[in-house]
Image (tube, grey):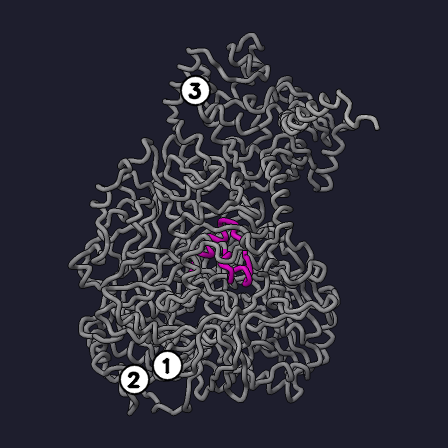
């Protein structure tokens, strides 16, 4: 009877130990990679919508203020999705026959809401409040990416907790001041006006980065110093900002 | 252990209890008889945090391996919660309402009516969806507070069991079909053939509509039936004044109050206001030398009597003699009478006290006391000059004031004689609530056309051909008067979810008009210029009260002739009382109210036969023993309950249980499942079956005997017991003057303790606000309003009787009841122990024992001093709860929120009746600002952190910290007596700091050095030093 195990069996045996040990680790790594990839987070993945609404056209080209549609962004936790009526305030006058706007006209006539696909979302155990972020001068683009340049709206950031915590732990790296604006709240919306009036070259390097949708953390010492000044002036209590119950309750 | 197998338990030996009590030294506080007797059951509750958990010993080897493998595999996955988010939709408005800001609630003023009488509410609404009911600070009957009934009425709005369609013999029909059928029947009925039976109604616009209806159908008669014993008050007024008037009281001017079996803190239309007024006379915020005083003569212990400075446990049928004795003392001629079993010198002292406080005292009788007691109270109050200062009379509140029993009797007689051809029942449930000797169900069958219009298709609905859905009070317009005659408009917040209509709309439809409720109400008040009125109308809606004259003052004086006492019978006494949580049975389908522990006994989901310890001993029964109760030739079986403070030879039963129809919750637990047919065992027993028109409230000649066997009762009184001493502090007013700390002798000194401590003085170097709470036990009446407020605000699910029995109730607030044994008082016989309530919720320890034991850091401290609970991190080890000395953490064992029918776990899902919308409907009730917790999550009070965050953010936007009083926790907001104060303890001028530094302030289990943020102020009783003996409180 021939030998049951050939000499190369040893190699197979050793390899199987390695593979066996590595497989769970690899599965874990793969799962971690998947959960962070755009497949899962949907970052920069445009979503189909009933109406192909373009922020780029309405904000960058026409110069509409964010608050024209997102009316409650300064007052409430929700920014607010505009009612059909808001669309119709212009589109009853212009582009009245555009086939792209048919769902809007139909919604207005039938009094049935337009059902949009939600682009930015946080789990229900997270309580996010837009108004306080705006009051602190956190620009829309800082969290939402280059919204003003989006043809079709997509998610700019993954909204994973570690990302939120970067700013909540050290807001001085993220807060900045526009000397031309009277208040942090104003500077949020002034930025888009400035872009209209002066073009990209008229903006500060930080603002330009914002417009490109780049991550905003600034490691420059003068920026951090300025950030610290802002934190102090606004009375931001940094210690408390990363308490669990600030967002989870 | 999924069934409620009554595990045989050793009998509670009351002799042992007495002996132990007589050996007690100092003041000793105990939660239940089991604690004194140290029964095994009690020890088990005390020692084991989860006495009903399954243990490893009960699992075999194979299953063990299976579970281990599965938990390992799933443990990794649990980390992925929230990572894989499904695609969700956003649905904006087509036209947004004008005032609405997305994400911000709106508040509307309206009224809640119970027994026809209004209490003002503010209803919170999120994007069109009412979510919470709070009191209206501008309404005289609410003063900003809300009782449990008011708050739980929001659950009724979304109850999937509510009547949803018009039905004819059980089949779905339409309003149009009903209206044409009813009009045909009414045309043929002839004069006197058409009858309307409603509950008590004070709505003037309904009265006007009824008048129009009676004009359209001449001879149509209106009967009223409310099973709640208001008749005694009405008849008392007739006896005293020769006509019906409405009586209300002003406790703010009363220095001395004598309660004759009256529960004015809970069961009266003005209770919320009375609670506030009375406790305002006992606030000890500033040093004071005087305090008001409450003497209470009581049968079944209630929160009012317990709160009193002196309490006598007397049989309800003896109260009349006591009333006569007091009346004789103040100079009212009352004829010869007995003593009522209370020491004459005590009564003399009370009379002296009353005489010293002429014009500033109140003698008040309970609604289940006979009319003559009410008459005597009128006489006493007149003799003491209280009328006009503390006792007020107005014209009746009801549109058509009647004696309800007579009104129902005449209807039943006419039904039996065949005169009634058409009967429309508005709201009432007489088949269940009518006196048993009326045999209402039999009489009803003789009416050819019968319809019931009500919220639930109940026992009466089952006997009617037609059932019509009633609109909830948040769905239709209406109006009603408050206890003092103030008129308010009932403003709806939502279109009817189903096909409900208001009472007035139904009458209007039957007249052949389809006037909506808005026009029916508004047109009733519309006068003068329409534009001017419109402005006025909007102002009424905004403030929650209407600027129309209150009910006119009635200038009446009592006749002075009181009939001689009559003997009503002999033998043991039976007392019928409204249930403290489900009232007359109308709230039986409310899970919140069913599970709310009864204030005194802490029983949930059931009624029992209450008896004194001595009576229980003579019958050789104890808690949960099944007894048979015979009265009026009828007999029922129920659980015996030993109730310290109950008079001897007397039995109290609560009405409202034993419901057989009216919703999945009220119909009780499924008993067996036979091929899809579910037999249900109702909660408790139906006490109405014993109640006859000659003994509506008190009867003599009841026979009670042990029936053998046990009836399991789910009571929370010994759940979550704390181990330690100096948990509750209470003392007399004299003691308080000597030593305002009320510290017991064995208490440890705080300064001394802090010296020994290794912890640094300031735990956090953080200069923001530090949250803290203080609860004044001296003001707490134990009314349960806070418990329901917390449930409503924090999305706390109902768990069901089976789960309560296993101590799995999820209420974040536990309202502990403590009996006091004082060595200086002769109350060793348990007959009438002093009682103190203590609301206990998470005290947010600065050095919290729960925090270091959590393996996943799901409970950690915030810089503002909150002991945070991070639900999304919790993996459910329950170590925190095990390590919590206050026992305030609650674990969600089953998926209670998504499965509100847990209490029917024995019904297989397929056999459950399919209800339209079901759980989806109940979800609309949830507060969107609070996470809905799932299975396997620990939860607890965090001082309404959502409200703190809201106020903090609004403050930050204005560049400041929240101001004192800006953050009001849900429990604080609902509390009728302003017992709870919340705020920033780092701010020395805040209200909470002042209370926290009051000499009376102490912290529970201080010796453990947990440094709780919640402190308590001890209770003070203003006892009359001339009265000694057992009647301490």
Q: Which residue is mark 3?
A: A172
Question: In this rendering, which labeled residue sits more in front, label 3 or label 1?
Answer: 1
Q: Are marks 2 and 3 on the same chain?
A: no
Residue with the most extreme front position: A1
The residue sitting at the right extreme is A1
The answer to whether residue B68 of the structure is visible from this angle is yes
Query: Is the same chain shared between marks 2 and 1?
Result: yes
> To which chain does the residue with label 2 belong?
B
As for residue A46 lying within the magenta part, the answer is: no
Element under label 2?
Answer: loop
Identify the residue at horizontal 30%, vertical 70% (top origin). B20
Label 1: how many residues lie within 10 Å, few (<14), some (14-19) or many (20+)? Answer: some
Which residue sits at x=30%, y=57%? B725
Q: Residues within 10 Å of mark 2 (few under 14, many from 20)?
A: some
Q: Residue at x 44, y 64 (%)?
A: B41
Secondary structure beneath dot 1 equals loop
Q: List the residue tagged with mark 2.
A: B341
- For the N terminus of chain B, give its image quadrant: bottom right
Q: Which chain is home to disc 3?
A: A
User: Horizontal and vertical percent for residue A215?
Assistant: 55, 18
**In the shown orientation, is residue B325 left or right of residue A18?**
left
Figure quadrant of residue B677:
bottom right
Query: How many C-alpha atoms fall within 10 Å of the one at disc 3: few (<14), some, or many (≥20)?
Result: many
Q: Are marks 2 and 1 in contact (CB under 8 Å)?
A: no
Seen at 57% across and 85% down, the residue is B438
Q: Which residue is mark 1?
A: B648
Q: Position of residue B425 (x, y in %)?
A: 62, 73
Alpha carbon of mark 2 to alpha carbon of mark 1: how far?
Answer: 12 Å
Q: Is residue B803 magenta?
A: yes
């Amino acid at each position: 009877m021939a030998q049951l195990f050939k000499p190369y069996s040893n190699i197979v045996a050793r390899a199987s130990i390695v593979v066996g040990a590595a497989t769970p680790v690899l599965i874990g790594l793969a799962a971690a990679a998947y959960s962070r990839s755009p497949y899962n987070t949907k970052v920069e993945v445009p979503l189909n919508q009933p109406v192909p609404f373009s922020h780029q056209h309405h904000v960058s080209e026409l110069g509409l203020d964010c608050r024209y549609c997102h009316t409650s962004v300064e007052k409430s936790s929700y920014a607010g999705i505009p009612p059909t009526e808001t669309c119709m305030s212009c589109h009853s006058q212009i582009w009245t026959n555009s086939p792209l706007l048919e769902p809007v006209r139909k919604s207005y006539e039938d009094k049935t809401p337009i059902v949009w696909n939600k682009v930015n979302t946080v789990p229900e155990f997270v309580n996010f409040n837009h108004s306080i972020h705006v009051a602190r001068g956190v620009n829309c683009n800082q969290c939402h990416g280059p919204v003003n340049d989006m043809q079709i709206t997509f998610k700019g950031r993954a909204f994973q907790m570690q990302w939120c915590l970067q700013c909540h732990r050290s807001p001085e790296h993220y807060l900045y001041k526009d000397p031309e604006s009277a208040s942090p709240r104003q500077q949020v919306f002034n930025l888009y006006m400035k872009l209209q009036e002066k073009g990209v070259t008229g903006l500060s390097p930080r603002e330009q980065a914002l417009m490109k949708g780049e991550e905003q953390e600034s490691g420059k010492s003068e920026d951090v110093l300025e950030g610290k000044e802002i934190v102090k002036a606004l009375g931001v209590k940094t210690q408390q900002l990363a308490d669990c119950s600030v967002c989870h309750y | 252990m999924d069934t409620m197998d009554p595990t045989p338990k050793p009998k509670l030996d009351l002799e042992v209890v007495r002996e132990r009590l007589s050996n007690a030294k100092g003041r000793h506080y105990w939660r239940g008889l089991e604690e004194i007797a140290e029964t095994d059951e009690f020890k088990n509750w005390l020692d084991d945090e989860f006495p009903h958990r399954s243990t490893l010993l009960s699992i075999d080897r194979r299953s063990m391996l299976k579970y281990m493998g599965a938990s390992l595999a799933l443990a990794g996955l649990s980390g992925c919660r929230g990572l894989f988010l499904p695609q969700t939709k956003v649905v904006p408005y087509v036209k947004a309402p004008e005032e609405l800001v997305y994400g911000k609630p709106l508040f509307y003023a309206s009224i809640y009516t119970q027994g026809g009488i209004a209490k003002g509410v503010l209803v919170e609404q999120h994007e069109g969806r009412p979510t919470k009911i709070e009191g209206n600070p501008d309404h005289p009957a609410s003063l900003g507070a809300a009782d449990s009934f008011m708050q739980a009425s929001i659950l009724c709005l979304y109850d999937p069991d509510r009547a949803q369609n018009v039905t004819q013999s059980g089949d779905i029909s339409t309003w149009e079909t009903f209206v044409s059928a009813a009009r045909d029947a009414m045309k043929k009925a002839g004069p006197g053939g058409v009858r309307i039976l409603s509950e008590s109604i004070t709505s003037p616009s309904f009265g006007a509509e009824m008048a129009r209806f009676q004009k359209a159908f001449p001879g149509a008669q209106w009967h009223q039936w409310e099973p709640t014993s208001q008749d005694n008050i009405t008849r008392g007024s007739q006896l005293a004044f020769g006509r019906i008037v409405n009586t209300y009281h002003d406790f703010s001017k009363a220095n001395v109050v004598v309660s004759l079996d009256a529960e004015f803190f809970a069961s009266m239309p003005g209770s919320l206001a009375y609670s506030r007024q009375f406790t305002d006379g006992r606030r000890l915020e500033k040093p004071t030398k005087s305090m008001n005083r409450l003497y209470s003569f009581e049968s079944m212990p209630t929160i009012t009597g317990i709160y009193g400075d002196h309490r006598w446990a007397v049989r309800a049928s003896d109260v009349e003699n006591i009333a006569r004795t007091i009346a004789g003392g103040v100079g009212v001629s009352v004829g010869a009478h007995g003593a009522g079993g209370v020491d004459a010198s005590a009564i003399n002292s009370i009379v002296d006290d009353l005489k010293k406080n002429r014009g500033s005292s109140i003698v008040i009788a309970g609604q289940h006391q006979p009319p003559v007691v009410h008459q005597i109270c009128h006489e006493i109050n007149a003799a003491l000059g209280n009328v006009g200062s503390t006792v007020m009379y107005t014209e009746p509140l009801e549109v058509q004031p009647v004696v309800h029993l007579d009104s129902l009797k005449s209807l039943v007689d006419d039904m039996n004689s065949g005169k009634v051809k058409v009967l429309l029942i508005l709201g009432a449930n007489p088949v269940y609530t009518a006196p048993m000797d009326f045999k209402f169900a039999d009489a009803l069958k003789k009416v050819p056309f019968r319809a019931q219009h009500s919220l639930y298709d109940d026992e009466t609905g089952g006997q009617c051909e037609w059932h019509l859905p009633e609109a909830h009070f948040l769905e239709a317009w209406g109006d009603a008067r408050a206890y003092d005659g103030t008129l308010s408009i009932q403003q709806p917040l939502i279109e009817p979810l189903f096909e409900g209509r208001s009472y007035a709309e139904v009458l209007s439809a039957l007249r052949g008009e389809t006037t909506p409720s808005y026009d029916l109400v508004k047109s009733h008040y519309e006068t003068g210029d329409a534009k001017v009125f419109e402005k006025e109308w909007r102002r009424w809606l905004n403030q929650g009260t209407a600027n129309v004259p209150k009910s006119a003052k009635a200038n009446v004086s009592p006749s002075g002739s009181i009939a001689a006492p009559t003997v009503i019978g002999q033998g043991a006494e039976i007392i019928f009382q409204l249930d403290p949580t489900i009232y007359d049975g109308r709230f039986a389908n409310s899970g919140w109210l069913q599970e709310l522990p009864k204030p005194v006994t802490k029983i949930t989901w059931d009624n029992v036969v209450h008896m004194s310890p001595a009576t229980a001993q003579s019958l050789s029964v104890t808690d949960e023993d099944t007894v048979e109760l015979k009265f009026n030739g009828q007999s029922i079986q129920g659980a015996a309950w030993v109730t310290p403070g109950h008079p001897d030879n007397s039995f109290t039963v609560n009405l409202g249980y034993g419901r057989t129809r009216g919703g999945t919750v009220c119909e009780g637990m499924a008993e067996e499942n036979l091929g899809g047919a579910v037999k249900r065992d109702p909660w408790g027993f139906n006490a109405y079956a014993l109640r006859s028109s000659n003994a509506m409230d008190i009867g003599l000649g009841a026979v009670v005997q042990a029936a053998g066997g046990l009836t399991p009762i789910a009571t929370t009184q010994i759940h979550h017991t704390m181990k330690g001493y100096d948990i509750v502090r209470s003392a007399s007013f004299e003691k308080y003057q000597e030593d305002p700390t009320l510290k017991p002798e064995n208490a440890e000194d705080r300064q001394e303790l802090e010296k020994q401590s290794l912890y640094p003085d300031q735990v956090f170097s953080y200069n923001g606000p530090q949250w803290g709470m203080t609860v004044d036990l001296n003001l707490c009446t134990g009314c349960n309003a806070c418990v329901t407020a917390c449930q409503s605000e924090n999305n706390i699910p109902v768990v069901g009787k089976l789960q309560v029995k296993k101590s799995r109730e999820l209420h974040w607030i536990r309202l502990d009841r403590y009996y006091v044994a004082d060595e200086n008082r002769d109350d060793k016989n348990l007959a009438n122990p002093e009682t103190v309530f203590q609301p206990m919720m998470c005290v947010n320890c600065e050095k919290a024992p729960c925090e270091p034991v959590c393996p996943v850091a799901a409970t950690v401290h915030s810089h503002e001093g909150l002991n945070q609970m991070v639900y999304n991190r919790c993996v459910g080890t329950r170590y925190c709860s095990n390590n919590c000395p206050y026992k305030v953490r609650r674990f969600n064992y089953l998926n209670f929120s998504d499965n509100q029918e847990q209490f029917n776990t024995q019904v297989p899902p397929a056999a459950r009746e399919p209800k339209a919308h079901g759980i989806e409907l109940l979800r609309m009730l949830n507060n969107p600002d609070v996470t809905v917790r799932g299975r396997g999550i620990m939860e607890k009070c965090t001082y309404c952190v959502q409200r703190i965050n809201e106020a903090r953010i609004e403050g930050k936007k204005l560049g400041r910290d929240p101001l004192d009083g800006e953050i009001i926790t849900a429990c604080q907001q609902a509390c009728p007596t302003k017992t709870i104060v919340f705020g920033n303890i780092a701010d020395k001028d805040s209200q909470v700091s002042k209370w926290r530094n009051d000499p009376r302030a102490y912290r529970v289990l201080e010796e453990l050095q947990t440094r709780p943020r919640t402190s308590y102020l001890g209770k003070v009783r203003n006892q009359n030093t001339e009265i000694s003996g057992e009647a301490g409180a």
